[in-house]
Image: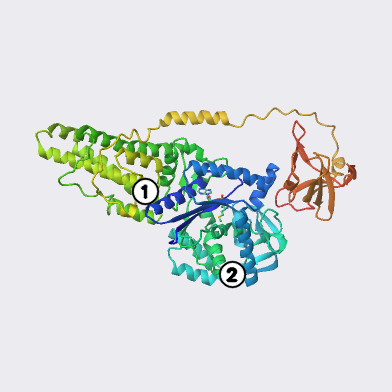
Amino acid sequence: MPKPFYITTPIYYVNDRPHIGHIYTTVLADVAARFHRQLGEPVYFLTGTDEHGQKVEKAAAARGITPKALADEVVTNYFEVFQRMGFTHDRFIRTTDADHRAAVQARFKELLDKGDIYKAEYEGLYSVSDEAYVTETQAKELQAQGLAHQLITLKEECYFFRLSAYQDRLLAWYSDHPEFVQPDFRFNEVKRFVEGGLQDLSISRTTIKWGIPVPGDDAHVVYVWFDALLNYLSGSPEGGWPPDLQLVGKDILRFHAVYWPAFLMAMDLPLPKTILAHGWWLMGESKMSKSLGNIVRPEQLLRFGVDAARFYLMRDMQVGHDRSFSYEGFMERLNADLANGLGNLAARSISMIRKYREGAIPVPASPLPEPTPGEGHLIERFLAAGRANRFDEALEALWTVLRGMDGLIVQVQPWKIAKDEAQDAQARAQLDQLLEQLWQTLRVAAALVAPVMPELSQQLWEGLGLPGRAADQRLDQLQWRIPAPGPVGDPGPLFARIDKEAEMQEMESAAAKTEAPAAPALDVPALREVVDYDTFARTDLRVGKVLEAERVPKSDKLIKMKVDLGFELRTIVGGIGKAYAPEALVGRQVVVVANLAPRKLMGIESHGMLLAASDNAGLPYLIAPPEDARPGFIVK
Ligand code: MSP
């Protein structure tokens, strides 16, 4: 069995449902996978979800459920959308899969034994959102971006990967493998980063529970990026190593182009051939993100069909660059390229063949040459762009040719020559030539776009009277001209024109309807009596951190916690069990009434109380100090 063309996508965090940014990476991978299958290569396509780490732990805590429960719930959205998008991955890997967990532990141990991983004490500035220690310069950058609240000082004993030892080998690898990172301008950023010097990388955490335990040292979990990157290895097919194409967004290129190859070098494994970094889908100027509330979900594109969604994402984004999304732009693209462009050309051509030649494809005495999209010939240009993972360029070349065909029809004016052809042999030959050229072009177009639009291409293929499947046509053996196997069929319209104005109106009214229902009016209790400042100031409020939490037996409301106040540990029993699961509390910062007289609750003495807001039903909402506050801080 020859080595398959092995292609991967990043694995997606399960803290939220997929949006079109995630879908874009996977469409790109799926199109590349289908394209290589049509080149006759065996292909292995891996995608999946990244389920450990602080992001997922936090999102689960916010919902009051366990991280695994959150992962199990969110992953079903991925399964469903990936199926609707027509993705043809060979495996959907989850980092909670048993084989992956075992592989990560085995590799960790291997590097520990070799000395590439070592244990040491470390104190430094740590970015909570990147889940990584940052350098002084990076910290300054974050502060300049107003993200200082994401930085905390962290001191812990942890395991380090000897990244600094790989600087020279990485640089040598980069200069020997100019195709290692695409596009070039991103490769230059990577090189500059490595030239600037590499620090050893902390690859274990004690602050997080949700992860793969370090083998033989359960207090530590493996750093989520070491865990996540290794999915490509644990999910690799038999005989498939190394990956040929790894797709990533520009935001995670450093992990893939610096850490990942260094890990592989340490393991004495061959490196991937190409890491392709794409840009972002933006809304206006900003990246789509949940916190900005500007997310476009794949369902919103899928309303117009799977091919429409896939085509738009491939066609409108220049690989490597950012692109702004707009619904209007989306519909305009579909109307211009699918309803008018390809759809209209196919309908006109097939109906002319039926009308003027009773459905039979003519055999012209002097056929027209293969059309050119400007430079080179269509098939060759399309394949070269596809092999370079530039499907946007490939589609552009094809649509240039399709527009050329529209132009040819206008120029030849078949409706006029059809009238003369009974008397005029030259007119007849010219019409034969045109109709055959249109048929060959559409046939080649159907085979070429099959990786992008699996359904529409098949409908066109059959409409042209061709047997079998468009997706089974070998692109490397695609001939510009073949004898027609039989008469054309009747494909029906390939893509119905979208009434953009009506759709926009409908979307606006749907958006108005789905806007969050107004919260029920709050039953505001009357204010209590006025107290002077001194009375208030007698209450000592402190920041605390929950270290342990468990339910009090036989109570659905009470939770017993061990809370770190910075200067001492307290046992506190709180009536928050209906709103929070114990595991969601561990690690959370809270505000504690620290000088409250102790009180027994169900036989347990509670030394303090947690501050919480509450709604009409009396459900508690714990007051959370900002991330950079520390246990012991006074609240006043
Ligand atoms: N879990 C890590 C990846 C680990 S891979 C070993 C992660 N996950 S993610 O869900 O946040 O992002 C996954 C991919 O989606 C990244 O490649 C990211 O670039 C991409 N996108 C997320 N938002 C995006 C846009 N708005 N536009 C395009 N792609 C973006 O990072």
Which residue shows up at 42% across the image and 30% down it?
501
Residue 170 in sight = yes
Image quadrant where residue 63 sits: top right
Which residue shows up at 35% across the image and 45% down it?
470
Q: Residues within 10 Å of mark 2 (few under 14, many from 20)?
A: some
Q: Say the numbered circle drawn on residue 281.
A: none
Q: Specify whether tag 1 is near ligand 1 (CB below 8 Å).
A: no
Q: Position of residue 137 (x, y in %)?
A: 60, 61
Q: Which residue is mark 2?
A: 164
Q: Position of residue 539 (x, y in %)?
A: 85, 44
Q: Quadrant of the C terminus?
A: top right
The three-letter code of the residue at mark 2 reads Ser
Q: Which residue is mark 1?
A: 472
- In terms of secondary structure, where does tag 2 sit? helix
Q: Position of residue 87 (x, y in %)?
A: 47, 46
Image quadrant where residue 328 sits: top left
How far separated are the C-alphas under marks 2 and 1?
A: 48 Å
The three-letter code of the residue at mark 1 reads Asp
Q: Residues within 10 Å of mark 1 (few under 14, many from 20)?
A: some
Which residue shows up at 50% across the image and 65% down it?
271
